[in-house]
């Protein structure tokens, strides 16, 4: 069975860091938003997609240099602060079968985060950025998951995706994979599990220790190999 992991908020606790940086930076262009609101509205989206929403709401374009400066600032903060989500190392030490990472983050940022948390070597070379593979479309488009399935020559129903955002669950569900919602990241809030279920997650877990039992249940229910 192929297991496909999102990265931000699933493998590494980066969403809360990104939300703080986004909140600080967006205030500079006149868009006041708290880190908590950033998470609820934008978790799972690329920053370019966030900028499109912000521009529409403030009624003007934002200087292109803003995005570049934000990217540099966030990369620095992540390199200094990001940590692995509790329990993920133990899970990977005991998880059999093929695995990969499918993320909206760039490969550059994925490497920064995953090397700092000792996760890079556990997945390489099967680490893919949605905007760098296939049709280059980010989640909620199913592109990156469809690409991963093709690389492993795996049928969608023989793959399980772990996602923490509505946009990510939407992408995985559209690709035809089984989807498990994850609410164990520091950015999760009450009500997130219901949103993930509504988006297409078949079940939701809060602890990595629960994933093996879920996969076993999937196999019994619907013949996952």
Image (cartoon, rainbow, N blue to C red):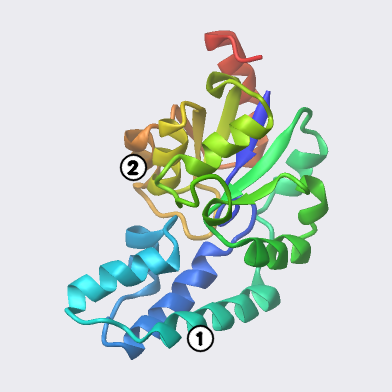
Against 90, residue 219 (above or below) is: above
Contact (Cβ within 8 Å) of mark 1 with mark 2? no
Taking the spot 37% from the left edge, 61% from the top edge, the residue there is 42
Question: Is residue 210 visible in this depiction of the protein?
Answer: no
Across and down, in percent, residue 197 comes to 37, 34
Q: Nearer the viewer, mark 1 or mark 2?
A: 1
* Number of marks present in the image shown: 2
Outermost residue on the bottom side: it is: 28
Could you tell me residue 79's position as x and y percent? Answer: 69, 75
Q: Identify the image quadrant of the C terminus.
A: top right
Q: Secondary structure at mark 1?
A: helix
**Residue 56 at x, y percent in the picture:** 20, 71
The residue positioned 56% from the left and 60% from the top of the image is: 105
Q: Nearer the viewer, residue 60 or 217?
A: 60
Residue furthest front in the image: 135
Residue 185 is drawn in which quadrant? bottom right
Q: What residue is disc 2 on?
A: 195
Q: Neighbour class for label 1 at 10 Å: few (<14), some, many (≥20)? A: few
Q: Secondary structure at mark 2?
A: helix
Please identify the quarter of the rendering in which residue 199 is found.
Answer: top left
Q: Left or right of 27: which side holds 180? A: right
Q: Which residue is mark 1?
A: 69
- Decide which of 65, 173 is in the foreground and name it: 65
The Cα–Cα distance between marks 1 and 2, rounded to whole angstroms, is 32 Å
Q: Using a 10 Å C-alpha cutoff, classify the residue at mark 2 as few (fewer than 14 neighbours), some (14 to 19) or many (20 or more).
A: some
Query: Which residue appears at 34% of the width and 72% of the height?
Result: 51
* Dot 1 or dot 2, earlier in sequence: 1
Name the quadrant of the N terminus.
top right
Q: Position of residue 66 (x, y in %)?
A: 42, 85
Q: Nearer the viewer, residue 78 or 89?
A: 78
Residue 175: give its label.
Answer: none
């Amino acid at each position: 069975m192929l297991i496909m992991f999102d990265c931000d908020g699933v493998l590494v606790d980066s969403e809360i860091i990104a939300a703080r940086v986004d909140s600080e930076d967006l205030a500079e262009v006149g868009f006041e938003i708290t880190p908590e609101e950033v998470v609820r509205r934008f978790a799972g989206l690329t920053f370019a997609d966030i900028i499109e929403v912000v521009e529409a709401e403030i009624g003007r374009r934002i200087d292109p240099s803003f995005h570049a400066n934000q990217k540099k600032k966030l990369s620095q903060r992540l390199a200094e602060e990001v940590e692995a989500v509790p329990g993920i190392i133990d899970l990977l030490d005991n998880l059999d079968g093929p695995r990969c990472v499918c993320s909206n983050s760039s490969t550059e940022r994925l490497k920064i985060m995953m090397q700092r948390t000792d996760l890079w070597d556990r997945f390489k070379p099967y680490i893919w950025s949605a905007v760098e593979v296939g049709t280059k479309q980010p989640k909620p488009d199913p592109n990156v998951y469809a690409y991963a399935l093709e690389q492993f020559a795996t049928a969608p129903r023989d793959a399980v995706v772990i996602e923490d955002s509505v946009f990510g669950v939407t992408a995985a569900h559209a690709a035809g994979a089984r989807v498990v919602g994850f609410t164990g990241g520091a950015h999760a809030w009450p009500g997130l599990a219901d949103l993930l279920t509504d988006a297409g997650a078949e079940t939701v877990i809060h602890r990595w220790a629960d994933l093996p039992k879920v996969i076993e249940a999937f196999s019994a229910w619907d013949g996952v190999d």
